Every structure is written in C-alpha cells, then in structure tokens.
Amino acid sequence: MDSDSVFGNVVRAPEDPILGVTVAYNKDTSPNKLNLGVGAYRTEEGKPLVLNVVRRAEQMLVNDLSRVKEYLPIVGLAEFNKLSAKLILGAESPAIQEKRVTTVQCLSGTGSLRVGGEFLSRHYHQLTIFIPSPTWGNHPKVFTLAGLSVKTYRYYDPATRGLDFHGLLEDLGAATEGSIVLLHACAHNPTGVDPTPDQWEQIRQLIRSKALLPFFDSAYQGFASGSLDADAQSVRMFVADGGECLIAQSYAKNMGLYGERVGALSIVCKTADVASRVESQLKLVIRPMYSNPPIHGASIVATILKDRDMYNEWTIELKAMADRIITMRQQLFDALSARGTPGDWSHIIKQIGMFTFTGLNSKQVAFMTKDYHIYMTSDGRISMAGLSSKTVPHLADAIHAAVARFG
Ligand code: PLA
C-alpha cells in the first residue's frame, strides 16, 4: 500500500515541457510519427548524426594508449578550456591575451549556466537576472535553483513575429543598476528572432551605461548562419568594449555531442588578477556539485579544435547542417504556399537557427499530435533540424488542417 511508503505522499511531477515531448513520441506506435520537439539534428533520412570528424577524433583517442582515465582537474581539461575561449572570443582576442578570461569546463550548456548562476549568487552584488520573454524553458528553473531571482524583459512581439525592440530597451532601461541580463548569443530559442547588429550595438550601450552584467547563452554557435565567427559577433562586441561578462558555451548542437555533456563557462574580467580569483571561487562551486567534469567529450572537442585539418573538416560539416536547416525552412514555406494555407508564413524563412516559432496555438499543436502524430512543444515551436524533404509534406498537411480547424 502507498501509505506504507515513507514516500507515499510524493506527488507525481509533470513531464518536462521539452524532453517530455520525446517521452510521448517514443510511446507512439504510428509509422508516420515525427518528433519536432527537442532540438536535435537529424539527417535527410531522419537519423541522428555523428559527425565524421567526431568519429575520427574518437578513433584517435581510442588508439592512443598513453591516454588514461584519471580525474580531470576541478576546472576540467586545460587545453579544452583555452580552445573554447578562443572559439567564442576569437583567436586574436585581447581579453585572452591579457589573461582576463577564466574558462572552466562544465556539463554542456545547462551545467555552464548553472555554475555561472551559482557563482553570481555567491559573489555578485545583484541577485536579479533578467531573461527574455519567452526564452528556453529551463532558464528560469536553472537560475532560480542557483539562488538568483528571475525577472523577464520583453523580447518577442507576436503581432509582428519579430523583436519587440522598443519593449526590450524599455525593460532593460528600467532594470535596477547592476542587474544580470541573460542574452541568447544567436539563434534565440524558441523564437528564432535575433537583434540586428545595429540593435545589438544599442543593447550593448544601454547595458554598459546602466552597469548591467551580460550573461550570454551560446548554445548554437555556427548553427544560425553556418559561420562560427558570424554567430559569435554579439559576444565579441561586448568583449571588445573592455567590459565584463559571462558566457555559457555548449557543444551539443554544433558538434553533435548532445549526450557527451560538454560545454564551458567563461567569465571575462577587468584584470588577470580578478580572473584568477574568480576561477578559485568557481572551483568551490564545482567541487561539491560534481567534483570534476567528464573527460571524453572534452577530449574530442580539444582534438578537433587544435588540429587545423580537423577544425576545417568540422566547419564544413557544421555548415552542411546549418544549410540543411535553412533548406527545410524554404521547403516548409513553399509547401504551405502551395496549399494556400491561410496566413502569412514568411516568418518561417525569416527566423534563424534550429527552431521555427510557428504561431500555432496549443489547441492546434494538440490536434497535430493526435491526428498527425507530429510531436512538438505546446508553444508552437518546431525543430527544423528534425525535418526532412520526405516529412515536409506531412507537416504542411498537418499545419494546413490545424489552421483550417482552429484558425
Ligand atoms: N541554452 C539554450 C538556449 C538551449 O536551447 C539549450 C538546449 C541549452 C542551453 C542547453 O543545452 P545543453 O545543456 O544540452 O548544452 N535546448 C534544447 C534541448 C536543444 C533541451 O531543452 O535540453 C531544446 O530543445 O530547447
């Protein structure tokens, strides 16, 4: 009997709004089922992809018998950390040369955000973090548990399906001095709407003038435009002004290392001395949390980033993934146009990155899941990376029917 258990009064928790979509998808027995929930890249054949260059790096690691399985230091693999900072800040970054950047290896993007959040809650004078509305569903949970107090700033305007730039400036302008501001470095999730370079510059000026602290979430470097440098421009703009910031990097998407949980947290400081003291405190955050990070994923990344040929091979494979996603946008847009689906669907080709924020409502989404076995998050976000030329017509039929039914 339940009542005999010391856990008898535990209430069943709901599934995660994103990862729970995969749980439901896995239970569906339809041969036509399609998972466009979680942002995971699939090939034209609908299969998960391990990059060639990653396979090659893994072979090299396996063949190298001098490699052992000892613990990494608390901050992770030194070479990986150095190369990660270079990747996001640029090879010639003065901040790196001046040793003002501390980088620690963390458990992918999520772990980097969490470690950064806990560091701030212990050592920063302002405990409020502003996150965009909407944002990745895990952000508020990560930062609340890290001990920060979460507020939102306006970001997306459903009427224009674009950036609510005026609202953003107004909300950040009204934020208490020193507040932390979470910014998506590129390919904003879930909206696919990014500020233009001019808008970024205005955001930067506002943030600096109010001494707000930028915390970048860079989960999609290379996935938005296909160029690693172009997708890092927002971050580099803020680092170039000499000010301080935090950056959480993930290799889940751009190297397809989802399950390896490999990422990095960089904190750009004013001086080398501050950076080294900050690092000493990051170790005190990490040690009681998971002691030290895993070795395999970081070794793959370091092997690729330090070898010119492998790096080049990676950029080509990365661009191919980004291009395939962009092609899917065009195909879906064309398919809806061909069907004469009511409404303006041009946002499908205008939005950037892994996701399209379709504007479909939760009723329409539920209908598409029930009648068409298409799985997506209830906010109407679809992972374009999960789509292929073969499945576009099925999705277009479903959207068309959903709009006709609940338009
Ligand atoms: N930040 C943003 C903006 C993300 O979209 C994601 C992943 C992460 C961080 C964390 O990724 P990582 O810890 O795996 O590096 N978002 C996914 C997956 C792709 C998820 O929800 O966990 C998504 O479907 O939104």
Image (cartoon, helix red, strand yellow):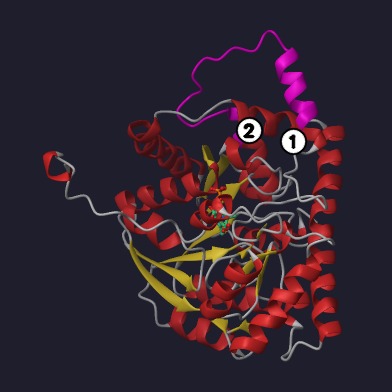
Q: Picture coordinates of residue 65 (x, y %)?
A: 69, 8
The quadrant of the rendering that contains the N terminus is top left
Seen at 86% across and 83% down, the residue is 338
Q: Is residue 75 magenta?
A: yes
Q: Picture coordinates of residue 99 (x, y %)?
A: 58, 40
**Which residue matches tag 2?**
80
The span picked out in magenta is: 55-81
As drawn, 390 above or below 333: above
* Quadrant hosting ligand 1: bottom right
For this view, does 369 lie left or right of residue 351?
left
Badge 2 marks a residue whose secondary structure is: helix
Badge 1 marks a residue whose secondary structure is: helix
Considering every residue shown, the one lying at the far top of the view is: 65
Does the residue tagged 1 have its C-beta within 8 Å of any atom of ligand 1?
no
Q: Tags 1 and 2 in contact by the CB under 8 Å rule?
A: yes
**Which residue matches tag 1?**
305
Amino acid type, callout 1: Leu
Q: How many marks?
A: 2
Seen at 15% across and 39% down, the residue is 5
Amino acid type, callout 2: Phe
Q: Picture coordinates of residue 82 (x, y %)?
A: 63, 36
